[in-house]
Image (spheres, rainbow, N blue to C red):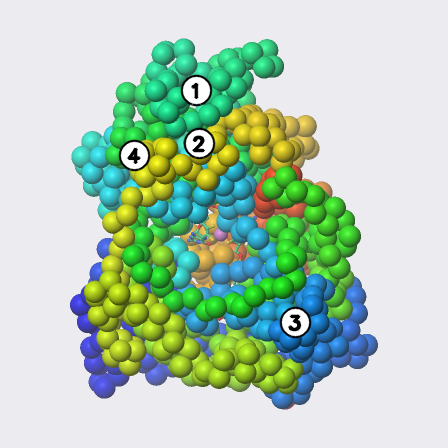
Amino acid sequence: MTSQTRRTGGTPYLYHSSHWGTFTAVREGDALRIQPISDDPDPSDILQNIPAALSHPARLARPLVRRGWLEDGPGPDPRRGTDGYVEMAWDDALDLAAKELARLGGGRGEAGEENAGRHVFGGSYGWSSAGRFHHAQSQVHRFLNVSFGGYVASVESYSSAAGSVILDTVAGNWRRLSREGRWWEHIRERTELVIAFGGLPLKNLAVSPGGNSRHIAAESIRAAAARGARFVSISALHDDFPNDCPVDRLAPRPATDVALMLGMAHRLIHTGAVDRGYLETYTTGWEALRAYIEGEEDGQPKTPDWAQAICGVDAREIEALADLAARSRTLITIAYGLQRAENGEQPVWMALALSCMLGGGVRRGAGFSYALGSMGNHGKPQLAVPSPTLPQGRNRSGDFIPVARIADLLLNPGGRYTYRGKDRKYGHIRLIYWAGGNPFHHHQHLDRLRKAFAKPDTIIVHDNVGTATTAHADIVFPATITAERDDIGASAGDPFLVPMKKLAEPYGEARDDFSIFCELSLRLGCLAEFSERRTAREWLEHLYGETRGALAEAGLPAPAFDTFFEGPPLHLPTSDAPSMMEAFHADPAANPLATPSGRIELFSHLAVAGGLPGHPAWIEPEEWLGSAMARTHPFQLVANQPAGKLHSQLDFGKTSMAAKIGGREVACMNEADAERLGIREGDVIRLWNARGAALAVARPSSGIAPSVIRLSTGAWYAPREIEGAGPACVNGNPNALTADRPASPLSQGCSGQLCLVSVERLKAPDPGTVPHENILLRPKRR
Ligand SMILES: Nc1nc2c(c(=O)[nH]1)N[C@H]1C(S)=C(S)[C@@H](COP(=O)(O)OP(=O)(O)OC[C@H]3O[C@@H](n4cnc5c(=O)[nH]c(N)nc54)[C@H](O)[C@@H]3O)O[C@H]1N2
Ligand SMILES: Nc1nc2c(c(=O)[nH]1)N[C@H]1C(S)=C(S)[C@@H](COP(=O)(O)OP(=O)(O)OC[C@H]3O[C@@H](n4cnc5c(=O)[nH]c(N)nc54)[C@H](O)[C@@H]3O)O[C@H]1N2
Ligand SMILES: [Mo]
C-alpha cells in the first residue's frame, strides 16, 4: 500500500474503513472530504453517504427514555412506536437502565445465578460498522455474557439461512464452501461459461462485512469476457449484471429457478452428457435424484417443456443452455437472494447438483460457487493470519432462536418449532437489548413486528440515529459513529488491516458502545470482568497484538501498535492452502466433506429428518406468479438489496438520496405493465397486499420482466394513514409488504426477498414522506 497520508494546509488525511471501502478523509471546516484509496480499482459511491452522518439531524445527541415507560414503569405496552420521549442526562439514564437490568437478574456476573439471561433477547442481529473492536453486536454479547451469564442468542443470518443450512447438510460446511476458492482469479483466467443465478450484481459486490478495500469484480468480468468467456445472467432484472459486458440473459419467473435447473438436468441425462464418473466418486444419492428428474417418482418427467410451463423460459433455450454448459468449463453461481425465499434450500441444492452432473469442480475454473455475486470478498484469497475480533465470553443460557424467528419468539412464548431436524421451544422474553442492528429495517411484515415489540417489559437500543427500531425502544442510548472513534478494520477476505483513525468529535453527547457498557457494568458490579481493565485504546493494541503475534510466527514481523496506527494499512499475507472443495477433489478419502457420507449428498437423510424432500425438488411456493394468490395480487415484488447504501444505514447520505425522488424510494416495473395500469415515470404508486402497503415512485423500464416490480430495502419505516386506503409506509420500505414466513421447517430462514403485491397509481392526495429526523418522536430541545 502506498502511503496516502498527505497534508493540505496542515490537515492530515487519515485512513478509515467501512463495509463498502477503505478511504482517506480530511476535515474541511464542518465538512468531511472522503477519497477512496488508490489501490481500489472500482471504489463504491456508497462512500459518499458518510459525510452527512457527522451532523445530520437524525443523529441522537442525548439519551432518551420513552414517556409511557417512565410514567407507568416496565411492562408490555402497545404504545411502543407511537409514544413520545424524554431527554435525560447520561448519569440518570444509565442509573435507570442499570436498575432495570438488575431487576431482571443482571449484575451477578459470571459467578451469579445460572441462566439469569434466559429472559433476555440479545441476538441483536445487524451489521453495525466495520471496525472490529467497536463492533456493536460483539460488545452487547460480551456485556450480556458478563452481566447476565448469557442471553437468548440468534443463529444463522438474514443473508443466508436456507442456503447455509442445506449446504451444511449436504456439503458439510457452507462457510468454507462460499468463502474459499479463488473464483475471481479462475474467472479471469480459465472459466469458459459462468451461469449466474441471480446475476453478479456489482451493487452487492461493493460490500463485505468488515471491509472491502479492492473492488475487483468489474475488472475480472471484463477480463474474462475479453478472453472469450461467456456469461449467462439468470434474473428478472437487467441490472443484476454489469451493463457494459456481453451477457446472455434469461428471466425465469422469480422463485422458479429449480424448475429451470431440473429442465437442464433432464436434458443432460437425455443427451448423455452427465459426468457419471464424478457422480460415482464424489456424490451419493444420484439414483434418487435421477429417478425424480425422469418422473419415476411422481409420474412427471422434468423435461424442458415441463420447466417452461413453470418458469416461462423457452424449452429450446433451456436445452441450449444445458448443451453449452456440458461442452464448456462451467461455473455455476447462485446469489443469496434466491434462497431468501420460500423453500430457499431447493435452488441452492439443485444448483450444486447440476454442477455435479457437469463434472463438479475437478477442472480448475469449473464447479459451484455459493453467493459469489452477493459479497465483495467471496472468491478472493483468504487471509493466512487471524484478523482481530473482540472475545464475546461464554453464553451460559444455551438458548437461541433462528434469527428470523424474532416476532414468533415474542408473540408465541412456549411455542414449538423445528430447526435443523430438532424440536425446539420459544422462551419467554422480558428484556430486549439491541445494538448495531435495525430489526425495523431487516425483519418482514413490520406491522406484525410492531405487535411483537409491544410484548417485553423493557427494550434498550443503542444507535447513532433515530431509526424505527429506536422508536420502539424504552431506553435509547446515542452511540458514536465509526468516524468518531479509533478502531481497526479487517475482513477474512481482504488483504488489509486498516488503522481506522478518528475523523471527528462525537456528535452531541454520543458515546462509544464500549463506554456505555462500561458504565452499565460499573453500576452492576462487573466492570473488571467486562473491560478486563483495558481502555478502548488498550483493547485495540491487545487485539492488534494477536494478529502481530501470528505474523511473527509466520516469519513476518509487523510494526508495534503505535507505528501501525499512525501509518498506512498493513498488508496481510493470504493463504495458499487448497480450498475445501479442492482438497476434497484431490483426495476424497483423505479429505472427506463433513456430511454423513463424506461426499456431496444428492439425497440426504438429514434433509428428510428436517422436513424436506430427500433430494432437491420443485416445491410450489405460496407466493409466486403461478399461485392462487397471484389472481388477487398479480405482481411479484423483488425486495432486494439497495444499490446506493448498505441496508438502512446512512439512508440520508448523498448517494442514497440521489437514488430517491422526493425523498421516496423508486420502484422499477415493466413498461408494458405500467402503461396498462396508467402509471407514468415519476407517479406515486401504492403497493399493497393483506399484510400492508408502501408508497413508491414509479420507474417504468424495459430492464425488468413483466409482472415483476422491484422495490429495494432500506427506506426508513414510516407507516401513515392514507386517505381511503389504510396505512402505508410512505417512505417505501418493502418490509411493510413481505411475509414473516420461514423458508422451511429445516432452516427457519428469512424469506423476505419475494412476495406478491398489487400495484396502482396513488389516488389519494400524496401524504408526503417522513424525513429521517422525524422517525423517532423527539422532545423539543431545551
Ligand atoms: N425484504 C427484505 N428484507 C431484508 C433483506 C432482503 O433482501 N429483503 N435482506 C436482509 C439482509 S441480507 C440483512 S443482512 C439485513 C440487514 O439488517 P441490519 O444489519 O439490521 O441493517 P442495517 O441498516 O445495516 O442496521 C445496522 C444498524 O446499526 C446502526 N449502527 C451502525 N454503526 C453503529 C455503532 O457503532 N453502534 C451502534 N449502536 N449502532 C450502529 C445503524 O445506524 C443501523 O441502524 O436485512 C435483511 N432484510
Ligand atoms: N449495495 C449493497 N450491497 C450489499 C448490501 C446492501 O445492502 N447494499 N447488502 C449486503 C448483504 S448483507 C448481503 S446478505 C448481500 C445480499 O446478496 P443477495 O441476497 O444476493 O442480494 P439481493 O440484491 O438481495 O439479491 C440478488 C438478486 O437476486 C435476484 N433474485 C431474487 N429472487 C430471484 C429468483 O427467484 N430467481 C432469480 N434468478 N433471481 C432472483 C434479484 O433480482 C436480486 O437483484 O449483499 C451485500 N451487498
Ligand atoms: Mo445480509
Q: CA distance from mark 2 to mark 3?
A: 41 Å
In the image, which disc is placed on residue 148?
3
Q: Residue at the spot x=22%, y=61% of the render?
A: 39
Report the label total: 4
Find residue 686 and report its horizontal and vertical position in percent. Answer: 62, 46
Q: Amino acid at mark 3?
A: Phe
The mark lying in front, picked from 3 and 1, is: 3
Q: CA distance from mark 4 to mark 3?
A: 48 Å
In the image, which disc is placed on residue 586?
4
The quarter of the picture where residue 769 lies is bottom right
Answer with mark 2 or mark 1, whichever residue precedes in sequence.
Answer: 1
Q: Secondary structure at mark 2?
A: strand
The quarter of the picture where residue 328 lies is top left
The mark lying in front, picked from 1 and 4, is: 4
Find residue 188 and report its horizontal and vertical position in percent. Answer: 22, 40
Q: Amino acid at mark 4?
A: Ala
Q: Secondary structure at mark 3?
A: helix
From the Cβ of disc 4, is ligand 2 less than 8 Å away? Answer: no
Answer with mark 2 or mark 3, whichever residue precedes in sequence.
Answer: 3
Answer with mark 1 or mark 4, whichever residue precedes in sequence.
Answer: 1
Looking at the picture, does residue 169 appear above or below residue 656? above
Where's the C terminus, which quadrant? bottom right
Answer with mark 2 or mark 4, whichever residue precedes in sequence.
Answer: 4
Q: Secondary structure at mark 4?
A: helix
